[in-house]
Image (cartoon, rainbow, N blue to C red):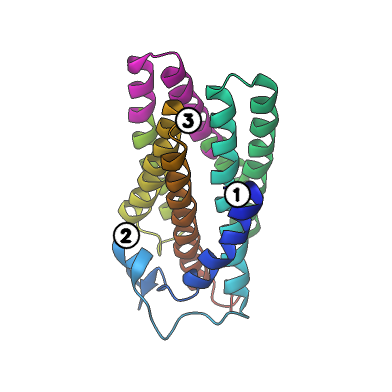
């Protein structure tokens, strides 16, 4: 599947996302499963500012998966120039995500978020290089650090927003890590069918993560995201 095809698929993800539940109900924190799957008639209209936020986060987070997959694929294939270009685009995406965070929580939060987000990309690179060099110890160490990182990122969001419970966000981040790892593993084996299936799952998951974050933010700032 090409980058263009994946972006076209985002429209399908967004359409499904509009039917998903709000991250929390009646001021009570939801579980990870509830944040992902519950549908409700009280969901925000497609024309609301909350829906605009959701679409923007969906675009940025889904793009993150596409660019990360391009970068890891190039690295595993030894295409250095391709890897550097993809990594540069991926970092621009990281900056854009941090600005989206800053637009809600301010410049201090943006400055704190960017290095935190970038750190998991560095760990993904470590896993990729460990896999490429047949160094299972390096690869496994990267996985363990990535799983620990899920709590750090969850702590950032739960600290900023009481509607985003830490355990639920951590579960979503872990799923992102696991699905992206599946992409890298398939790329390393040159199992292209498995690679693209894994990419589709990783891409779709980011759409659900965008829903949960956007709905939690909209609930926190109902006047801003009417």
Q: Nearer the viewer, residue 6 or 194?
A: 194
Is residue 156 visible in the rendered image? The answer is: no
Q: CA distance from mark 1 to mark 3?
A: 16 Å
Q: Quadrant of residue 141?
A: top left
Relative side of 215 to 150, left or right: right
In this picture, is 96 found above or below 13?
A: above
Residue 80 among those drawn in magenta: no
- In terms of sequence position, does the residue under pointer 1 or pointer 3 come before the other? 1
Against 25, is 98 above or below? above
Q: Quadrant of the C terminus?
A: bottom right
Numbered badge on residue 32: 2
Contact flag, marks 1 and 3 (Cβ < 8 Å):
no
Look at 59% across and 27% down and name the residue there.
74
Query: What kind of secondary structure does the magenta stretch mostly adopt?
Result: helix
Q: Is disc 2 placed on a helix, strand or loop?
A: helix
Mark 1, Cα crowd under 10 Å, few <14 / some 14-19 / many 20+, is: many
Question: Does the segment drawn in magenta span residue 139?
Answer: yes
The residue that mark 1 highlights is: 63
Q: Residue at x 68, y 27 (%)?
A: 82
Q: Position of residue 153 (x, y in %)?
A: 44, 44
As rendered, which of 181 and 198 lies closer to the eye?
198
Say what secondary structure mark 3 lies in.
Answer: helix
Mark 2 and mark 1: span between their CA atoms?
A: 22 Å
Q: In the image as oriented, which residue stretches furthest toward the bottom?
A: 41
> Is residue 12 among the parts visible in the rendering?
yes
Q: Position of residue 68 (x, y in %)?
A: 56, 38
Closer-to-camera residue (38/49) = 38
Residue situated in front as seen by the camera: 66 or 147: 66
Quickly name the residue at label 3.
Answer: 124
Foreground: disc 3 or disc 2:
3
Percent coordinates x, y for residue 172 in the rendering: 38, 52
């Amino acid at each position: 599947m090409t980058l263009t095809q994946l972006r076209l698929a985002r429209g399908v993800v967004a359409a499904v996302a509009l039917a998903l539940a709000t991250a929390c109900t009646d001021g009570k924190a939801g579980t990870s499963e509830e944040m992902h799957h519950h549908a409700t008639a009280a969901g925000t209209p497609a024309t609301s500012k909350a829906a605009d936020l959701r679409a923007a986060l969906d675009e940025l987070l889904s793009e993150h998966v596409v660019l990360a997959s391009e970068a890891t694929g190039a690295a595993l294939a030894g295409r250095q120039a391709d890897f550097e270009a993809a990594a540069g685009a991926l970092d621009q995406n990281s900056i854009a995500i941090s600005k989206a965070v800053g637009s809600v929580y301010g410049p201090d939060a943006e400055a704190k978020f960017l290095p935190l987000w970038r750190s998991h990309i560095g760990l993904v690179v470590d896993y990729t290089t460990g896999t490429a060099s047949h160094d299972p110890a390096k690869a496994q160490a990267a996985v363990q650090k990535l799983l620990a990182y899920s709590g750090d990122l969850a702590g950032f969001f739960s600290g900023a927003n009481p509607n985003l419970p830490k355990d639920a966000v951590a579960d979503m981040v872990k799923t992102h890590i696991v699905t992206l790892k599946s992409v890298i593993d398939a790329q390393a084996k040159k199992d292209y069918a498995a690679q693209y299936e894994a990419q589709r799952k990783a891409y779709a998951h980011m759409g659900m993560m965008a829903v949960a974050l956007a709905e939690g933010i909209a609930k926190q700032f109902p006047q801003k995201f009417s």
